[in-house]
Image: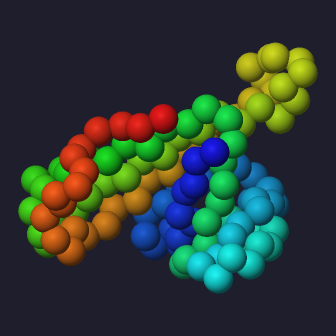
């Protein structure tokens, strides 16, 4: 299972789905609630199951004050029993954040 931070579009996260689609979100206090993308609030998380990948890059270098880019991708099979490409959707999210300190415990790359 992979987790993706669900923040308002002003923070550049994008989830490709219909406007009325609901996701089960979890807030920072562990409360769970079904939300449409327009109802996402800062601090909510969406759990994505299935195959997925999270990539971290440092577009302007890995130093404090520079941006860090996090990209998450996950394929969701709506009807896995059919094993048809038409019954799956790829979710993609991208977020840009500011590095508070120079990273020492991680480096750019992807994880599945």
Give the position of the N terminus as an image quadrant: top right
Outermost residue toward the top in this view: 83
**Horizontal relation, residue 6 to residue 111: left or right:** right
The x, y position of residue 13, in whole percent, is 49, 60
In the rendered structure, the answer to whether residue 57 lies left or right of residue 65 reads right
In this rendering, the count of numbered labels is 0
Q: Can residue 36 be seen from the camera position used here?
A: no
Residue appearing at x 57%, y 54% in the figure: 3
Q: Position of residue 79 (x, y in %)?
A: 87, 29
Which quadrant would residue 41 be assigned to in this image? Answer: bottom right
Residue positioned most to the front = 105
**Residue at the image point whose x is 43% and y is 53% from the top:** 94
**Colour mapping used in the image:** rainbow
Q: Quadrant of residue 109?
A: top left
- Please state if 7 lies on the left or on the right of 36 as rendered: left
Seen at 18% across and 50% down, the residue is 59
Q: What is the x, y in percent for residue 19?
A: 75, 60
Query: What's the residue at 79%, 73% (across, down)?
Result: 33
- Is 50 above or below relative to 36? above
| Left or right, 85 with reference to 107 | right
Residue 82 shows up from this direction: yes
In front here: 108 or 75?
108
Between residue 103 and residue 15, name the one nearer to us: 103
Most distant residue in the bottom direction: 29
The quarter holding residue 40 reads bottom right
- In the image, residue 53 above or below residue 12: above
Residue 91 percent coordinates (x, y): 61, 43
């Amino acid at each position: 299972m992979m987790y993706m931070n669900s923040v308002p579009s002003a923070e550049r996260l994008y989830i490709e789905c219909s406007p009325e689609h609901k996701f089960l979100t979890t807030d920072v206090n562990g409360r769970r609630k079904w939300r449409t993308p327009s109802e996402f609030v800062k601090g909510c998380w969406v759990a994505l199951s299935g195959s997925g990948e999270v990539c971290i890059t440092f577009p302007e270098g890995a130093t404090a004050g520079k941006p860090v880019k996090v990209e998450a991708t996950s394929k969701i099979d709506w009807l896995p029993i059919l094993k048809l490409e038409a019954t799956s959707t790829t979710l993609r999210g991208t977020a840009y954040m500011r590095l508070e300190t120079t990273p020492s415990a991680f480096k750019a790359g992807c994880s599945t």
